[in-house]
Image: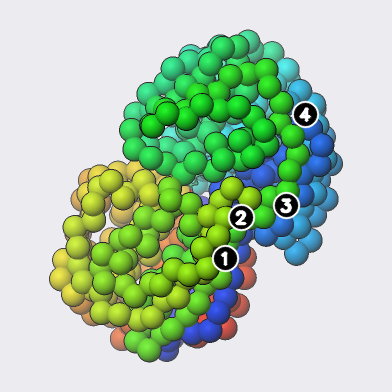
Amino acid sequence: MSGSNDVRFRVTPGGQLGGRLRVPGDKSISHRSIMLGSLAEGRTDVSGFLEGEDSLATLSAFRAMGVQIDGPHDGRVHIEGVGLHGLQQPDGHLYLGNSGTSMRLMSGLLAGQAFSTTLTGDASLSGRPMKRVTAPLTSMGAHIDATAEGTAPLLIHGGATLDGIQYHMPVASAQVKSSLLLAGLYASGQTCVTEPAPTRDHTERMLSGMGYPLERDGARVCIEGGHRLRGISIDVPADISSAAFFLVGASIAPGSDLLLEHVGMNPTRTGVIDILQRMGADITVSNQRDVGGEPVADLRIQSAQLRGIDIPPELVPLAIDEFPAIFVAAACAQGRTLLTGAEELRVKESDRIQVMADGLQALGVNAQATADGMIIEGGDIGTGRVDSHGDHRIAMSFAMAALRAQGAIEISDCANVNTSFPGFVEQASRAGLQVEVL
Ligand code: S3P
């Protein structure tokens, strides 16, 4: 949570979404562009960079480690890569705000440096589990101090000698996989990570794009130290996780017809489209193309009557950030929607199972939290106040719920919308959402 309880959204019910828009750049790819661009040799030019607080936290951290980074100016960032061994010790700790991706990926990368660093974050990030990265990194030879609960602040001791490991991840996590691959850049021998289910593969794609050898074989990816990265141009697509609010909003608001441009369609991220289409959503994918190793397309969404479904558990990691929005779709669907196998939602920026169930219930929706998911009976959305608990995706999801609500919805603690979607209120208003900031 940001501690900024004073930013509230008030959304007037009704309306529809229309027109065309390009939501901000992909958060995962933006983080990685700074990290890998900094470690590359030569210049990396980024366009479409997400100017949100999370990716800016990563940018500031690398600047603090001596990397010359110009921008962002209108999404353009230029990074003068310092090479794998060119980072310098920062003056103080590196504050990473709300950003789990920054902390987990940088833990691996920093475990291989000659100098020590301390990583800190806000109250939400300081409560999130870090053992999932510190434990396997420690078995590679890293020295990392955390709190007794295994949370930040993390003190990553410099000068450790890392050895490659063979690691079978107990949770399907791209952050853990990426953290170990980044440590693997500095390890002797091979570091191999096997995932229990496919997770986003932006790190692997960008490493390959920068000329770093990588072996992929089904669920296993292996890397070895001792090679080099070269600077490249990176065109960051629009974030499908930000597009998701509009996919849901346009689906549930009668009369909507909206075009979302240049959306990242990496198959490890498109679970939200599969799930909404199974619920009966009318989504047309066009203009499919490849942009610098990442698939991109335009998406047209027209409103449709949705129906409840049992969400296939194998789609969970492919839609992991989109469940707050999908729950809103389920609340507007005919019949019951059942989600299982999603206990990871409890350790995101907030406990997204509990916080969404509480908010939906406050609006009169029959939503029952379970240990690993939710049961939602579709029906009417009422009116009232919900608390986003400082979770950006929950705030934006409830904003879209107002399109079908019987009265206004007021959402508290919305400042963190800026972590992933700066300009949300303006873009959503232009598309037709009647939202004001209180
Ligand atoms: C991310 C991976 C996911 C996702 C997060 C971004 C990434 O987290 O929820 O928003 O950029 O690697 P997990 O790896 O914890 O599932």
Is disc 1's CB within 8 Å of ligand 1?
Answer: no
Using the numbered discs, state the Cα–Cα distance from disc 3 to disc 1 in whole angstroms: 16 Å
Instruction: Say which amino acid is labelled 3.
Output: Val
Marks 3, 2: nearer the viewer: 2
Q: Is mark 3 within 8 Å of ligand 1?
A: no
Callout 4 amino acid: Gly
Quick one: label 3 or label 1, which is nearer the N terminus? 3
Disc nearest the viewer among 3 and 1: 1
**CA–CA distance in space, label 4 to label 3:** 17 Å
Mark 2, residue position: 291
Disc number lying in front (2 or 4): 2
Q: On screen, 83 above or below 112?
A: below
Rendered image: mark on residue 46 = 3
Q: Which residue is mark 1?
A: 262
Q: Nearer the viewer, mark 4 or mark 1?
A: 1
Q: For the C terminus, which image quadrant?
A: bottom right
Q: Which residue is mark 4?
A: 83
Left or right placement of residue 198 versus residue 304 in this view: right
Which tag is nearer the camera, tag 2 or tag 1? Answer: 2
Q: Secondary structure at mark 1?
A: strand
At label 2, the amino acid type is: Val
Disc 2 Cβ-to-ligand 1 distance below 8 Å = no
Foreground residue, 83 or 410?
Answer: 83
- Judge from the rendering whether residue 46 lies leftward or rightward of residue 417; answer left or right: right
> Please, is residue 243 above or below residue 402 in the view?
above
